[in-house]
């Protein structure tokens, strides 16, 4: 038995973290679709590892991200994370780093891959959008991630607030490689997004390092733009972009814009990853007012899970995992094309009805 066959026959262990608000509903819907896709692709069933985060974890362990959960994640290569509602946590937990950010930092998930694609059947402001934003996920201007100890945001006096943005050559190099590898499998174009005209040292370093890495990928067309120009260009002609690579804060803002141009945050998938671990996490929040009503849109997390299976399939050279991921993406797309969607997208389907339709379609070729 060769290595690829051995990996294919080994049960896949995936963490499953419900989170808050609509989290349990969309996570349950995603698990159902993954199980169906794995079966349809001829892969071994997933061994799911349920873990606590958020309000339930506070009730049981007094911590929204208990050490028990992190220790279990240490033993896993991949997991699915539901949304968290840290704004509603008790005051002593509200000021801490949000669970998703804490997990990203602990496990060094330096790349945040956020595709934006218009689907047939879903009204989109940019109906021809099909791009991927590759966001550096470990430093930049986000205060919870850019310091070894403590926060990068501080107040020397009650009337003055400051933030430190950190950009390192190592982080720029590794995120640039992610972007160029991704572009090689797409339309072979990378746009470096920065603000070097007013931040010449930090954003200049980001731009220049990405330009240096481009020399290792001679088949990829590369250009660069200021972030404000990119925002305007996205609104006017999103079809012009293929892969965009950018700093943490800029990537967060641009990916939300791109998601809305493609139809809604409700279909915005993302993958957080390093070279060895990956986490599927929808871009949207916990929507606590919808919790328990069977009205939440599970598509974003289902598409995120498809990305996770694709990442594992590439890493392990596992065709069954690649097939399962492709089946989920295609099934969500054909469900939308058939006019089936949840209320946030103008449809009539409940969470469970939408999931049943997607699960049935993963078996179709």
Image: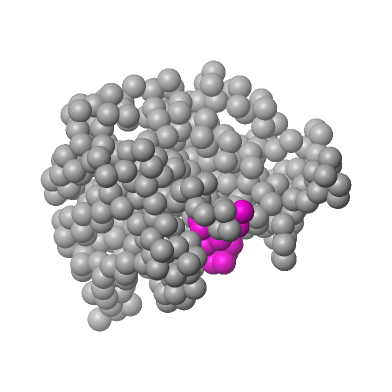
Q: Is residue 105 magenta?
A: yes
Q: Residue 320, relative to residue 292: is it above or below? A: below
**Is the image coloured rainbow, by chain, by secondary structure, or in one colour?**
one colour
Residue 92, position in %: x, y? 58, 58
Left or right side of 252 for 278: left
Left or right side of 220 for 19: left
**Nearest the eye: 184 or 240:** 240
Q: Residue 72, relative to residue 365: is it above or below? A: below
**Nearest the eye: 102 or 60:** 60
Residue 257, position in %: x, y? 52, 30
Q: Quadrant of residue 253?
A: top right
Q: At x 24% / y 50%, what residue is drawn?
A: 29
Q: Is residue 270 magenta?
A: no
Numbered-mark total: 0
Q: Residue 312, relative to residue 233: is it above or below? A: below
Looking at the figure, which quarter contains the C terminus?
top left
Q: Which residues are magenta?
A: 95-108
Q: Residue furthest bottom?
A: 1
**Nearest the eye: 216 or 81:** 81
Whether residue 76 can be seen here: yes
Left or right side of 163 for 40: left
Residue 88, position in %: x, y? 49, 48
Residue 112, position in %: x, y? 52, 50
Q: At x 49% / y 73%, what residue is drawn?
A: 67
Q: At x 54% / y 18%, what residue is drawn?
A: 236
Q: At x 25% / y 67%, what residue is drawn?
A: 46
Looking at the figure, which quarter contains the N terminus?
bottom left
Q: Residue furthest right?
A: 157
Whether residue 301 can be seen here: no
């Amino acid at each position: 038995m060769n290595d690829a066959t051995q990996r294919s026959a080994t049960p896949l262990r995936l963490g499953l973290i419900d989170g808050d608000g609509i989290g349990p509903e969309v996570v349950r819907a995603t698990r159902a679709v993954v199980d169906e896709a794995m079966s349809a692709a001829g892969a071994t069933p997933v061994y799911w590892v349920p873990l606590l985060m958020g309000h339930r974890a506070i009730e049981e362990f007094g911590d929204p991200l208990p050490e028990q959960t992190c220790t279990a994640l240490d033993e896993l290569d991949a997991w699915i994370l539901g949304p968290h509602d840290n704004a509603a946590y008790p005051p002593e937990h509200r000021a801490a780093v949000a669970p998703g950010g804490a997990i990203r930092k602990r496990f060094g998930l330096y790349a945040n891959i956020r595709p934006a694609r218009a689907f047939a059947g879903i009204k989109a402001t940019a109906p021809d959008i099909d791009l991927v934003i590759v966001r550096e996920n470990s430093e930049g201007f986000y205060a919870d991630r850019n310091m070894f100890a403590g926060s990068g945001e501080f107040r020397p006096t009650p009337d003055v607030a400051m933030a430190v943005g950190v950009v390192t050559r190592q982080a720029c190099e590794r995120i640039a490689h992610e972007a160029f590898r991704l572009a090689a499998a797409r339309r072979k174009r990378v746009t470096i997004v920065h603000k070097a005209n007013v931040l010449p040292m930090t954003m200049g370093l980001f731009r220049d390092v990405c330009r240096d890495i481009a020399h290792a990928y001679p088949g990829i067309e590369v250009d660069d733009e200021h972030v404000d120009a990119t925002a305007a260009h996205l609104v006017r002609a999103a079809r012009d972009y293929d892969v965009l690579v950018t700093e943490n804060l800029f990537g967060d803002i641009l990916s939300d814009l791109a998601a809305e141009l493609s139809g809604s945050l409700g279909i915005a998938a993302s993958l957080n990853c390093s070279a060895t671990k990956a986490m599927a996490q929808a871009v949207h929040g916990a929507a606590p007012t919808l919790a328990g009503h069977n009205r939440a849109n599970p598509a974003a997390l289902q598409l995120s899970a498809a990305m996770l299976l694709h990442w594992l399939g590439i890493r392990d050279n596992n065709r069954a995992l690649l097939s399962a991921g492709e089946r989920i993406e295609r099934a969500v797309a054909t469900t939308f094309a058939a006019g089936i969607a949840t209320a946030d997208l103008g449809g009539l389907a409940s969470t469970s009805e939408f999931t049943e339709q997607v699960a049935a379609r993963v078996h179709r070729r």
